[in-house]
Image (cartoon, grey):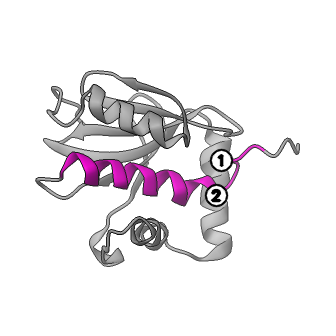
Amino acid sequence: MTRTTPHPLLNESLADAARRRGVFGEVQLEGSRLRCAARDSAAEAFYALEVVEGGLAVSLATADRWLSESIESDLMHHGDPLEELVSEELAELGVEVDPDSLVVRHYRSDDRLYTFLTPLPAGVSADLALTYLLAYEAAFRGLGDMTDDGEE
């Protein structure tokens, strides 16, 4: 995935809005990416809004293979497609999206991060981009070891 120059929606105002939601750890604006640490995850992971292939995308990434596998395992065990989970969380936040129109790519990136990524609709507003970020966090929070319960 190619990351490019900053997007006008990726600014301090959007970063502040993400911070105010209180569901993330540290929130940082890094040029072409708004990076939000996953709170309480068993391993380091972060959510992001970023420029990918000329448009905005929302993602979850971790360098920890076991965390990625724990998420995959939960998805296989419960049988819920990730697109459906994200769509349900968007609906909870007031945005109706057909799960068939959502794409969730899962891959290991060139920078060796296990990544789940969803391209956002063209012309998305800052509010809608933030809603996708919040829906991603809510969808992934209950999967695998995204919430560290202290068990070994």
- Image position of 79 (left or right of 55): right
Q: Residue at x 67, y 40 (%)?
A: 41
Does dot 2 land on a helix, a strand or a loop? Answer: loop
Identify residue type, mark 2.
Leu
Percent x, y for residue 22?
A: 54, 40
Vertically, is 76 above or below 21? below
Q: Which image quadrant: the N terminus?
A: top left
Judge by depth and name the residue closer to the eye, 42 or 88. Answer: 88
Question: What's the magenta region?
Answer: 125-148
Does dot 1 land on a helix, a strand or a loop? Answer: loop
Is residue 117 visible in the rendered image? The answer is no
Residues under numbered marks 1 and 2 in contact, where contact means CB atoms less than 8 Å apart: yes
Residue 48 on the magenta segment = no
Q: Residue at x 67, y 53 (%)?
A: 70
List the residue tagged with mark 2. 143
Percent x, y for residue 35?
A: 41, 31
Q: Main SS type for the magenta part?
A: helix
The residue positioned farthest toward the front in the image shown? 20
Percent x, y for residue 91?
A: 40, 72
List the residue tagged with mark 1. 146
Vertically, is 115 above or below 15? below
- Classed neighbour count for the residue bearing mark 1: other residues with Cα under 10 Å, few (<14), some (14–19), many (≥20): many
Q: How many marks?
A: 2
- Image position of 119 (left or right of 152): left
Vertically, is 144 above or below 87? above
